[in-house]
Amino acid sequence: MSKLNLKIFHAYDIRGVYPVELNEEVAYRIGRAFIKFLKKEFHKSQLQIVIGRDCRISTPKIFKGFSQGIIDENADIIDIGLVPTELLYFSLHYLNADAGAMITASHNPPEYNGIKMIAKGPRYICGSWGIPQIKEIFLKNKFRKNPKRKGEVVKKNTINYYIDYLLTLINREDIDKNLKVVVDAGNGMGGKVINKLAKKLSVNLVSLYFQPNGNFPNHLPNPLLPENTKKLRNEVVKKKANFGLALDGDADRTIFVDEKGKIIKGDLIIALFAKYFLKNNPGETVVYNLTCSKVVPEIIKKAKGKPIKTRTGHAFMKEIARKSKAIFGGEISGHLYFRDMFYAESSGLAFLTMIKILSESKKPLSTLIKEFKKYYRIGEINFKVKNYQEIIKKVSKFYKNGKQNWLDGLTVEFKNWWFNLRRSHTEPLLRLVIEAKDKDELKKRKKEIEKLIKN
């Protein structure tokens, strides 16, 4: 086996560059370690695992190694094929399997790949439960060489059942059939679900890059970067669409564009969706990550909901959403979580929710969002650094007079402004978010913190 790089074990998935960090051999051992962990945790000798995968060029190799490891550890596989991640979450419940895994590197460039894992519950394999244990078993590498029984593989197509399920969550008669939507699937997996939903709803869909292609020839599968949504924004204006939607590689991030072709910040979408869900469900809980604008908890409280602030990361968010039975939740990065989707992401349900909101309100999306634009904000400036702990410590000392919180990196609050500085769990970056009541205050503090980091 090639030299192991343990940096592939992240806070909420396993991810690395193919083939130097993650390859068929490594995936095989991860598959075996995954099953050994589950058998010990659930006290079961026989397990059934659902596996989905994205369209990356390296995915067939990773799938082959990972699935063979599972089979050799005497667990059965239900192969649901090339799908967006939401299909994995649905299929785990629909097929009543013990656990599931998605082979994907989500929004990362094409040279990356990864494995995202989940157990029945739902319980998401992450740094606080699962990843450390799997890593330990992986390192010991003590697996039976000639197992008496090997697992079996069956293939199942669950997408039509999933579409039917999503459609039970709405009244199709209330949908405005005149709505026009532009969706950029980025040559990832999300077009499969959106295309079927649009046809069932009879809404006008303008599709961009729906053909899966692991090379991502039109743009990288990261909709958070403005250059990757340029075509989408232009098409929304050109086609006079009601809104646009950009998806990442496995469609677990959804970024919205209003009818004017302007990108809507993720936390403003969380505020809009929270207000919508709480309108008919007052008293329910909504979770949001700590880098969201202060307007998010303000709107949740105003709508008579219960806000819960969490650290960033899908596994952590979902676990808190599950425990609190939250009706909805979201991260500023475009991850949106729905109780109706087993506390997981669903680009299909995000698409449906926006269509319902616009159909009921009869107002442009830009108008609906306007009330949430209360503060001035700079969202996620990234710094490539090596000594991130030293830098965060230095910044903490400089702002010792502020109210400090270490839930996820360093958050410091003052009367008229606040910031969060944290290490990325998926990339070698330090991320900075700043928000203020005043534009001049924002500029001043941005310059101040950047100087501290760069020096």
Image (cartoon, rainbow, N blue to C red):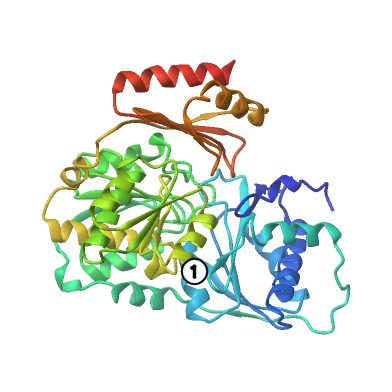
In this rendering, position of residue 435 left or right of residue 398? left
Q: Quadrant of residue 338?
A: bottom left
Residue that mark 1 sits on: 89
Neighbourhood count class around disc 1 (C-alpha, 10 Å): few under 14, some 14–19, many 20 upward = many
Give the secondary structure at mark 1: helix
Q: Residue at x 76, y 46 (%)?
A: 5
Which sits in the foreground, 273 or 115?
273
Q: Is residue 96 left or right of residue 354?
A: right
Camera-side residue: 91 or 60?
91
Residue shown at the point (29%, 63%) measured from the top left:
283
Q: Position of residue 66 (x, y in %)?
A: 70, 65
335 in relation to 284, above or below: above
Tell me which amino acid carries mark 1. Tyr
Which quarter of the figure has residue 201?
Answer: bottom left
Residue 92 in sight here: yes
In the foreground, 58 or 141: 141
Q: Position of residue 339 (x, y in %)?
A: 39, 67
